[in-house]
Image (cartoon, rainbow, N blue to C red):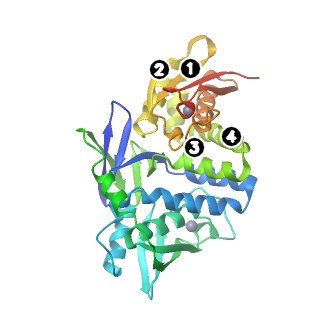
Amino acid sequence: MLLKYVELLYDPEIGELYFCRAKSAIWERVIASLFQRGFEEILGPATKRVFYTQSKEMIKEFGVCFYISKLEKLGEPEAEEILKKLSTFGYGEFRLISFINREIKIEVRNSFNSSDYPKSERPICYILSGILSGAFEVCTGRKVECEEISCMTMGKSSCEFLIKIGAKKRSMGERKIEKKKTEIERDLKTIKLRQKRSVLYFKSTPSVIFGKDFSPMINRAFEKLIGPAVKGIVYNSNKSTVLRIMEKYKGVKKFLVVHFGRLLKKQIIKWVTEELEGRGYGKFVEVSTEEDKLHVKVKNCHNCIGYKRARKPVCYNFSGIFAGIATAIFFKNFECEEIKCIATGDEYCEFLAEPHI
Ligand SMILES: [Zn+2]
Ligand SMILES: [Zn+2]
């Protein structure tokens, strides 16, 4: 069995994770698809465009990784190289089918985007399509679009993508890439993720690597389309995802069932926040479960990246997650409010979850 490791750098002081020198977060492997489904149920076809364009931008943050050389001429070996790099993110098992006249056909087995997705009549790997187009765009300096031709969710054994390489872009982010190269100065801890075939494991959980700001990028793009309704969608899908993960992963479920009675709530919370911190979501500076309440403070929160003086707190993701965790550990419905937020100018984000019947 092919077994290897993917290395990331970690700064425990601020809870910052780097992959290919870009700030990163390690997501549980199916969460992005769950969000996609959540939005799609409410918004329909507009979902595809948002996930495609935001994923395309997100993967460009890892430009160093794909910027193989000044590729005036992209050939099969270079395309293979890009696919090899993409596989280190845990997205799936990539194979080049053909490369003819600036059109590249790619097969992806075990796409993170379609695993755990219900049957569909049309391709649904919007995130992976965006990622493929972005990786080839940042590498070639040309305009690149990608279309999924057939998908695992349509009953196929793999997904197939068609990449079209277009005209040269006026300015490519060479300077941006150079800047990223010098970003990290401190000595950092090396984090190793196990990779078995195409799947990447954070501890024992299948996971994928995204840019740290991927979730606020998606939230903002949807906010532009539908405004404040995004808050409810993101909050609810995070809350139900937390509860669903606890259901889905037998190991976690067993852990919770076996230890619920014995472990103090505080210890369970500590375990969960350490997990989130290790995944690059932020630095948890204070966590307490006094008086039937869950109270959390987070510095360097991933949800706040890219907001310029928001008028209201923006970390619906975390609010939903903490509501879900509190609901699970207190055995009754909890809702969570963000009372301070970095995006509105505070030093940290602060969450308070309370019983809500
Ligand atoms: Zn697919
Ligand atoms: Zn916040």
Name the quadrant containing residue 62: bottom left
Q: Nearer the viewer, mark 3 or mark 4?
A: 4
Q: Tell me which amino acid carries mark 4.
A: Lys
Which of the two labelled residues, at mark 2 and mark 1, occupies the earlier sequence position? 2
Mark 2 in CB contact with mark 1 (< 8 angstroms): yes
Q: SS at mark 1?
A: strand
Q: Which residue is mark 4?
A: 231
Which of the two labelled residues, at mark 3 and mark 4, occupies the earlier sequence position? 4
In which quadrant of this rendering is ligand 2 seen?
A: top right
Q: Which residue is mark 1?
A: 295
Q: What residue is at 35 percent from the left and 79 percent from the top?
A: 74
Residue 234 at x, y = what percent? 65, 42
Quarter of the figure with the N terminus: bottom left
Q: Tell me which amino acid carries mark 2.
A: Glu
- Asked if 30 appears above or below 323 in the picture, the reply is below
- Asked if 296 appears above or below 195 in the picture, the reply is above
Q: Residues within 10 Å of mark 1 (few under 14, many from 20)?
A: many
Residue 293 at x, y = what percent? 61, 17
Q: State the count of labels.
A: 4
Which of the two labelled residues, at mark 4 and mark 1, occupies the earlier sequence position? 4
Q: Which residue is mark 2?
A: 286
Q: What residue is at 53 percent from the left and 73 percent from the top?
A: 145
Q: Tell me which amino acid carries mark 1.
A: His
Q: Which residue is mark 3?
A: 248
Between the residue at mark 3 and the residue at mark 2, the CA separation in whole angstroms equals 28 Å
Residue 291 at x, y = what percent? 61, 11
Mark 3 in CB contact with mark 4 (< 8 angstroms): no
Between the residue at mark 2 and the residue at mark 1, the CA separation in whole angstroms equals 8 Å
Q: Residue lying furthest front in this view?
A: 170
Nearer to me, 228 or 178: 178
Q: Nearer the viewer, mark 3 or mark 2?
A: 2
